[in-house]
């Protein structure tokens, strides 16, 4: 389950076993768009987060690896590192670890005032 205050327009989450894009958020639900273009409203309890992986960082989000390290990833001037618990955190920040794509999208948006998906 995802808390409503964690979601905003543009976030990617899972609904009905598919990756969807949040179009609008309401008090207890969100309007999401499926890859087919179809839109539906889902209660927050029905939406699932997308677990962030190193494969997703490189293949879908186009992050690169920093030097010879296996744990630091970057996109322009934004650096994150993988922690021992399978999560990630900002390298130049004191942020709590994050584990899901929508959390990374929100951090990136706050820092750069643009969508992470706009980097593709």
Image (cartoon, grey):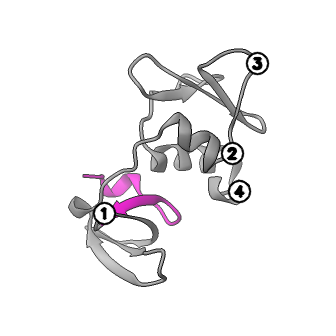
Using residue 6 as the reference point, say whether residue 67 is left or right of it: right
Q: Which is more N-terminal, label 3 or label 4?
A: 3
x, y percent for residue 38:
42, 84
36 or 28: nearer the viewer: 36
Instruction: Assign a secondary structure to mark 1.
Output: loop
The residue that mark 1 highlights is 17
Instruction: Assign a secondary structure to mark 2.
Output: loop
Q: CA distance from mark 1 to mark 3?
A: 36 Å
The residue that mark 2 highlights is 62
Q: CA distance from mark 4 to mark 2?
A: 7 Å
x, y percent for residue 117:
64, 57
The answer to whether the residue labelled 4 contacts the one labelled 2, judged by CB atoms less than 8 Å apart, is: yes
29 or 118: nearer the viewer: 118
64 or 102: nearer the viewer: 64
x, y percent for residue 111:
66, 43
Instruction: Assign a secondary structure to mark 3.
Output: loop
Q: CA distance from mark 1 to mark 4?
A: 24 Å
Instruction: Assign a secondary structure to mark 4.
Output: loop
The residue shown at (43%, 16%) is 84
Asked whether 2 falls inside the magenta stretch, the response is yes
Q: Which is more N-terminal, label 3 or label 1?
A: 1
The residue that mark 4 highlights is 120
């Amino acid at each position: 389950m995802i808390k409503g205050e964690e979601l905003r327009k543009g976030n990617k989450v899972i609904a009905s076993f598919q990756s969807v894009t949040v179009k609008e958020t309401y008090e207890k639900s969100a309007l999401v768009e499926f890859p087919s273009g179809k839109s539906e409203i889902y209660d927050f309890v029905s939406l699932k987060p997308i677990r962030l992986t190193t494969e997703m960082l490189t293949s879908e989000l186009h992050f690169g690896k920093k030097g010879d390290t296996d744990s630091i990833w970057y996109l322009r001037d934004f650096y994150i590192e993988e922690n021992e618990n399978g999560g990630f955190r900002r390298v130049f920040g004191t942020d709590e670890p994050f584990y899901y794509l929508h959390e990374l999208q929100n951090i990136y948006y706050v820092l750069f005032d643009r969508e992470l998906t706009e980097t593709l």
